[in-house]
Amino acid sequence: MKICRMFKMIFETHGHYDDERFDEDRDELLKECEAQGIKLIMNIGADIKSSRATVELANRYNHVYGAVGVHPSEVGDMTDKDIEELENMALDNAKIKAIGEIGLDYYYDDNPPKDVQAHWFQAQLELAKKLLLPVVIHSRDAALDTMNIMKEMKAEEIGGVVHCYSYSVEMAREFVKMGFYIGIGGVITFANSKKLREVALDIPLDRLVLETDSPYLTPVPYRGKRNSALYIPYIAEEIAKIKNISVEEVYKATFENGKKLYRM
């Protein structure tokens, strides 16, 4: 089924196509995405293993690029050697364009302690500054601490994106002032997405990027199924409705925004 119908060029700025849920049809899917107009895909590392897989995917497919990093839920046993490996991955591969996803996640009780998360968030921000790379920020139920660490570490000097944005309009404005983009995915199509809709309306189009977080957060009407970049039109169409602009404007602006974000 052809899901992407009416666009020319899309930038999928955040997906996890190394995930095992793509094992059976990864090659077919990534080629279909390219054929359907998804011209650039950013695969995002969540731990050392997936960061290695991200490098492999970026090397295998012309339209796939990557970010390497360790998600806050995965930093419990992180070491300085992991920082060194992330650095080498980025230095050795021109298609690695960011450090991420990194940040804070206070949602689950069994996540690493807050001080451990903060330490490795700071360490990875420091790595990004050293490498002059933007960062992909994951922040869940940790808005103030995330902002405070980013300001303390002068994250505005490197920029990046706040992925899967879930906070207030006021907080989004603060991130944008720091030079960050706001990542919007399938949640914008959910019935309970009032707060995100307000953000999408308020934040200028030139600071928004499209993402899926595949295989997660599939937009309506496919919610609950495996997500992929082929469903991005549902996200773009919702943003177009909210902003009262054409979907073509959304595609064009967010494609350019993605390239600026990842300095491509």
Image (cartoon, helix red, strand yellow):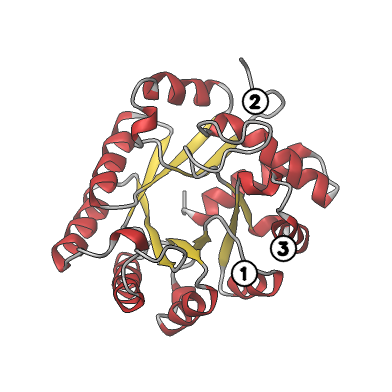
Which of the numbered marks, if any, corresponds to residue 96?
A: none
Question: What kind of element bears circle 1?
Answer: helix
197 left or right, relative to 164: right
Q: Is residue 36 above or below residue 186?
A: above
Question: What kind of element bears circle 3?
Answer: loop
> Residue at (64%, 59%) from the top-left corner?
207
Identify the residue under disc 1: 176
Q: Position of residue 153 (x, y in %)?
A: 40, 80
Q: Is residue 32 above or below residue 246?
A: above
Looking at the rendered structure, the kind of residue marked 1 is Val
Identify the residue under disc 3: 203
> Residue at (35%, 58%) from the top-left corner?
71
Q: Is residue 137 above or below residue 63?
A: below
> Residue at (39%, 31%) from the top-left corner?
21
Looking at the rendered structure, the kind of residue marked 2 is Cys
Give the position of the N terminus as an image quadrant. Answer: top right
Identify the residue under disc 2: 4
